[in-house]
Amino acid sequence: MKPAARQRAASYYDWDADVLVLNILGRPAAPRDAIGRVQGTQLRVSVRAVPEGGRATDHLVRFLAPLFGVPVSQIEVVFGRESVHKQLRIRAPRCFPPELAELASRRPPPRPA
């Protein structure tokens, strides 16, 4: 495996055309909603909501939507609705939180129509 491919494979995010795929390590029932550090191949995100019946995941999606400039409907929970280990797909994010500014510079160019 080439070094660039190895780095990409070990990352907490990937791009699938204009869809940002994020691997999340959730921290429910936290003192505040916050984006944390990268831990291995996951981005740590804390939310205030309690982890009952997917409520923390729902809160996580509502917390992230405005940070990425998308409506809640453009964020899909691929897996981990009732787990701290999650994968999200964010369709066509329009902006990025300051903690994740690197994602904007690594966004693939738009495909020709």
Image: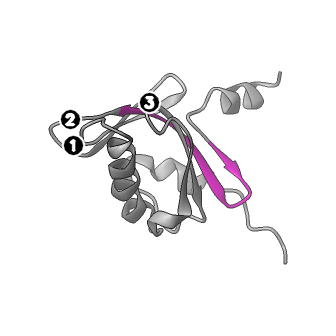
Marks 2 and 1 close (CB-CB < 8 Å): yes
Quadrant position of the C terminus in the picture: bottom right
Which residue type carries mark 3?
Answer: Ser
In magenta segment, residue 22: yes
Residue under label 3, please give it.
83
Q: Position of residue 5 (x, y in %)?
A: 76, 30
Circle 2 sits in a helix, a strand or a loop, which is it? loop
Work out whether 9 lies above or below 105: above
Which residue type carries mark 1?
Answer: Arg
Circle 3 sits in a helix, a strand or a loop, which is it? loop
In the picture, measured across the screen, residue 65 lies left or right of residue 73, that is: left
Alpha-carbon span between mark 3 and mark 2: 15 Å
Q: Position of residue 53 (x, y in %)?
A: 36, 39
Q: Residues within 10 Å of mark 2 (few under 14, many from 20)?
A: some
- The boundaries of the magenta stretch are 14-26
Work out whether 8 lies above or below 96: above
Which residue type carries mark 2?
Answer: Ala
Q: Nearer the viewer, residue 113 or 58?
A: 58
Q: Residue at x 36, y 58 (%)?
A: 62
Work out whether 30 lies above or below 103: above
Residue under label 2, please give it.
30
Q: Position of residue 111 (x, y in %)?
A: 80, 68
In magenta segment, residue 58: no
Circle 1 sits in a helix, a strand or a loop, which is it? loop
Alpha-carbon span between mark 3 and mark 1: 15 Å
Q: Position of residue 77 (x, y in %)?
A: 54, 47
Q: Residue at x 44, y 30 (%)?
A: 83
Residue under label 1, please give it.
48
Quadrant position of the N terminus in the picture: top right
